Image: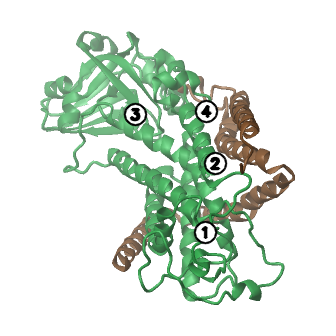
Amino acid sequence: MKSAPSDLPRTGSRPQTGLVPRTVAARPTWWPHFSSTVRSTALTARLGRALGVAFSICFLTGLLSYTQYLTWPWLPKPVVPAWGYRATQGLHVITGIASIPLVLVKLWSVYPTTFRWPPFRSVRRVLEIASAVILIAATLVQLVSGFLNLLDWRPFRWDFVVVHYALAYVVIGSVLLHVAIKLPDIRYGLGTRLADGDVLSEVPWDENPDSHSNAGPLPAPSTPAITRRGLLVATASGIGLVVITGLGQTVAPLERVGLLAVRQPSRGPQGVPVGRTAVEAGVVEAVTSADWRLDVVGPQPYALRVADLEPLATRQVRLPIAAGQGWSASAEWRGIPLLDLVQRAGGSVESRVVVRSLARGGITKAELTGSQLAEAVLATHLNGRPLDLDHGYPIRLVGPNRAELFDTKWIGRIEVQP
Amino acid sequence: MRAARLALGGAGILMIGYGIVRLVHSLPAPMLALLGGWLLAVVIIQLAVLSPVILAVGVALRVLPDRGRGFVQAGLIAAAAVTIIAIPLILRQHSQPAAKAMLLQDYRLNLLLLLALIAAGLAIAYAVRVARDRVKPPGA
């Protein structure tokens, strides 16, 4: 076990332990032995650092996205920058995707530590194993379920948002715990040149006669085939390809090279993708019926018919539509300022307004206050043409820096609470 | 460093606890059991299936001469990164309504293109290395 030395090691070195290597001889002859000289704490620490950055990005952008679900009165929901949600969620998703191969390479680099001998030598070692198992389990489920969710594929059946949000704390918590446990190793790994670092094998460094802490200064281990730097370059290249070909679902100029992009925004109706179709939402009949009307409920309630919308739809805005699944597209919208309808119903910019959809199941309403209320537009036209049925015909909500999920489509009712 | 480790570890344990409490409170028992199954399954797959397969590939590559082997290893790493992302896309392609503008591509073909690109890049890098070694033999 890589027990923490009681005295602090200098950066870039481990203390001379003077321990007599014993486990090498004591373990059974059939016990696995790892001979690759490519693995090293110096390599693992660098992979871990990259993952630390990636997970921090995912956690912070994820928390930001979660605020879209909250309606706490004190929670600000800024309208600037209008592309904020688009940028943060595009980043969240592509960073999560890039983390999948990165995690696998990281786990490869430490695989020999699975085979410490004896496996459960001390309480401390058992706790270390437990923390690693939590970290690996939570991380892999988080990344895999997150990726499958992008494909609207949920074989896990649980409520994705609930689990993704809660599991994020387990992932980040176990990362912090892992860093705490491994801090001496991390300091050594990052403080040592990549080529020079001790080989990481199944034998802990303090018991390994070939580690520099026992053998003194050593020449860099020979890596006859791929080098450690080569491994990092290969990993970065593979991940780079994944990122460039995956970003096309949110960065328009990259759509043409989007070989691994889940969505191709320009192929959606009116040049914009759809999160949920009218058929999926079960609204086709309700919104195409001659009886359709928009009820505005408040101190002075009224209702609008389809023919009433057109003369009111005078506001032109260019706004991105951006989903938590990381796709987005910029578009020209024309519609009615929500505040106009709210004021006509006796409300004001101080009101709390709930916009309700005729859709069945899923998220079917949005709550707006303050600047979000002031900036929101009830769109009837998209890119110069009346809204497609799948985009929320006859009228939908759009606004700056909002999640597509809360850009309520197929609106049937607006509630104004002054 | 001791104080930093205690602070990090303490914060980590609190966050893990918070996450677990949230899960237990918000999920019905059958879903918790399902989640537990997934958590267990991914660890087993990673430790007992994926890793041994990768090791076996590494051992099999030892028949190659060192210089060429390094390039093959690099190529396989990059190829694996691309492939692992492409496989779910291939499994789900054309499964959704067209209006979603999603999974409309032939990802099998796209994966082949990417693998060909990686192979071509490595072939060029290998040729450059061989040419360089001829001018200045390794170790000289």
The residue sitting at 23% across, 49% down in the picture is A75
- Expressed as whole percent of the image width and height from the top left, the position of residue B3 reads 34, 78
Q: Gap in Å between the C-alphas at discs 4 and 3?
A: 22 Å
Return the mark for residue A230: 2
Front residue of A366/A248: it is A248
- Expressed as whole percent of the image width and height from the top left, the position of residue A118 reads 69, 85
Q: Are marks 4 and 3 on the same chain?
A: yes
Q: Which chain carries label 2?
A: A
Tell me the kind of residue under disc 2: Gly
Which residue position is annotated with label 4?
A260
Q: Do labels 2 and 1 share a chain?
A: yes
Residue A155 makes an appearance in the image = no
What is the secondary structure assignment of the residue under circle 4?
loop
Front residue of A295/B54: it is B54
Q: Are marks 4 and 2 on the same chain?
A: yes
Return the mark for residue A198: 1
Please indicate whether residue A257 sits to the left or right of residue B120 in the image. left
Is A140 situated above or below A246?
Answer: below
Q: Mark 3 lies on which chain?
A: A
